[in-house]
Image (tube, rainbow, N blue to C red):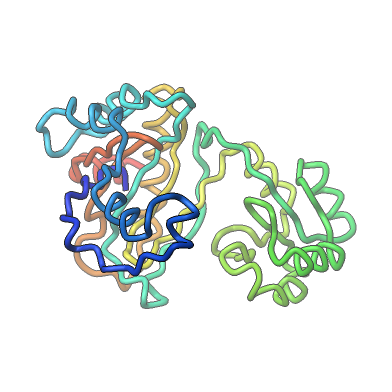
Amino acid sequence: MADTEVSTAPAETVPAVLETGEEKAKTGISTATRRRNKVNHARHSKRFLDLEKSLSRVSVHEPMAALNLIKTLSTAKFNETIEVAINLGVDPRHGDQMVRGTTSLPHGTGKSRVVWVFARGDKAADASAAGADLVGAEDLLERIQKDGGANCDILVATPDMMPLVGRLGQILKAKMPNPKAGTVSPNIAQVVRDIKAATRAEYRVDKNGIIHAAIGKADFTAEQLSENFAALVSALVKAKPSSSKGKYLRKVSLTSTMGPSLALDLLEVQKIADRG
């Protein structure tokens, strides 16, 4: 996370490593020395640390104020992505508490992605017309097997293709098309259009019960980011598993790609979710 603290662990905590002539010859510095230097090296740039120092002592922020502030903190030399991390009151180890799905963001994420499609016949033609980067069936399966993976951002498929795609389970892993993620659909053209237009946002809780998702770019207006944030939070609340007990939204943080994070006021976030 962006708010990781600077490590000040003493050199004594570094395990002893035998220094060999070969190791010194490669870099002029032994492995043990390199590890000591890494431990004592700041994990963030001076720019980041200066931004962090500029923040007020306010512990939590009202969402709109945080969005305005995060834009001013996005000072990298590229258009940073604005991301949200939401800690949910679920235990992903239980299948009935897995939170996963997609939602449409009113203003998109600002990032176009490479899409490959498993489809045949008219569906394949529809996918190509919608802007898919690569469409195929057995030929696409052979390519993925040969390459040892799919060099794309998202892989989607029509339902009739899943018996074929299922053979790639061990290779595709997280990229495997899944109905819950909306990447298996009979309306393949619409799915491709949504993804290519960057209006489609996917969310999936990790092993720690946290959702990480992009809600736009630093050059979006605060109002656009706010509407995207509201759409995501509303979708997550609607996706709350019935088996989840107690507090559902436990912590919400906002950050940019290269900036510090801001904690949001949970009461205000809940109000936004309720309005959705």
Q: Quadrant of residue 195?
A: top right
Q: Is residue 69 above or below residue 173?
A: above
Q: Is residue 116 above or below residue 143?
A: above
The image position of residue 149, as x and y in percent, is 69, 63
Q: Is residue 192 shown left or right of residue 227?
A: right
Q: Is residue 50 shown left or right of residue 174?
A: left
Residue pictured at 37% horizontal, 67% vertical: 207
Q: Is residue 245 above or below residue 271?
A: below
Residue pictured at 32% horizontal, 65% vertical: 208
The image position of residue 85, as x and y in percent, is 33, 48
Frontmost residue, 192 versus 37: 37
Residue lying at the far front in this picture: please name it: 21
- The quadrant in which the C terminus is found is top left
The image position of residue 222, as x and y in percent, is 37, 24
Residue pictured at 18% horizontal, 41% vertical: 265
The image position of residue 264, as x and y in percent, is 22, 40
Frontmost residue, 247 versus 46: 46
Q: Is residue 25 above or below residue 90?
A: above
- Count of residue discs: 0
Frontmost residue, 219 versus 144: 144
Q: Is residue 203 shown left or right of residue 45?
A: right
Q: Quadrant of residue 90?
A: bottom left
Q: Quadrant of residue 13?
A: bottom left
Residue lying at the far left in this picture: please name it: 57
